[in-house]
Amino acid sequence: MGPPGAGKGTQATRVADHFAIPAISTGDIFRANATAGTPLGQEARRYMDAGEYVPDEVTNLMVRHRIDEPDAERGFLLDGFPRTLAQVEELDGMIAFTGHRLDAVVVLTVDAEEIVARLLQRSEVEGRADDTEDVIRRRQQLYAEETAPLVEVYRERGLLVEVDGMGEVGDVTERILTSLDPIPQS
Ligand code: ADP
């Protein structure tokens, strides 16, 4: 977890490689579907481009199907999910059903000013439609309102691993792995 621009996607790939499990990014799946013009992509795009969350029913169903794929049988890392309390509950159900257990929830903490600068820079490099200043602010607001409260939910469950997300990419990865390696895997 972490606010937009915290580096979730970058770190998710690196951490998943370390544990030899797939990184499942809801944002990437929505974007791939939008590019391919699938019905899911067409629906998701309406929300993404405005910085709004895609409705829970749509997102939950997609994640349910994705973690059912054979490559996720040994475990998986979720990037960008859950983002709402309803998604937390849904994930609990999915995990119980597959026999997995949530081992840890990593939260990247970052400086708000730094993030807007990073995202505006990314918009020049990647051209993501939702990296304009207005939409970035809406995404940040939604994160604060809908997603930040989940940090406390997972803290209470004793699953939270808070990591400083500022600095070099490799340094952040090392901090995450140092925190995760001692945690037993289910
Ligand atoms: P970021 O976290 O940098 O904003 P993501 O790639 O994780 O970027 O997500 C991009 C967009 O995809 C979100 O703004 C939202 O519209 C949609 N999205 C991704 N994950 C979810 C989710 N779990 N629930 C609802 N919408 C989601």
Image: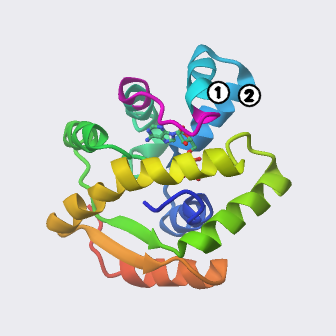
| Residue at the front extreme of this rendering | 134
Q: Does the Cβ of the disc 2 residue fall within 8 Å of ligand 1?
A: no
Where residue 46 appears, x then y in whole percent? 60, 24
Note whether residue 172 is visible.
yes
Q: Determine which residue is flagged by label 2.
A: 35
In the figure, residue 102 lies in which quadrant? bottom left
Q: Which residue is mark 1?
A: 33
Q: In which quadrant will I find the C terminus?
A: bottom left
Does the magenta run of residues contain 112?
Answer: no
Q: Are there few (<14), some (14-19), or many (20+) residues within 10 Å of tag 1?
A: some
The x, y position of residue 158, in whole percent, is: 18, 70
- Crowding at mark 2 (Cα within 10 Å: few <14, some 14-19, many 20+): few
Q: Position of residue 72 (x, y in %)?
A: 44, 45
Q: Is residue 104 above or below residue 172?
A: above
Residue drawn at 67 percent across, 33 percent down? 32
- The residue type indicated by label 1 comes to Asn
Q: Report the Cα–Cα distance between label 2 and label 1.
A: 5 Å
Question: Which residue is situated farthest in the left direction here?
Answer: 156
- The front one of 16 and 120 is 120
Establish if 76 lies above or below 161: above
Residue 20 image label? none
**Amino acid tagged 2:** Thr
Q: Magenta residues?
A: 48-59
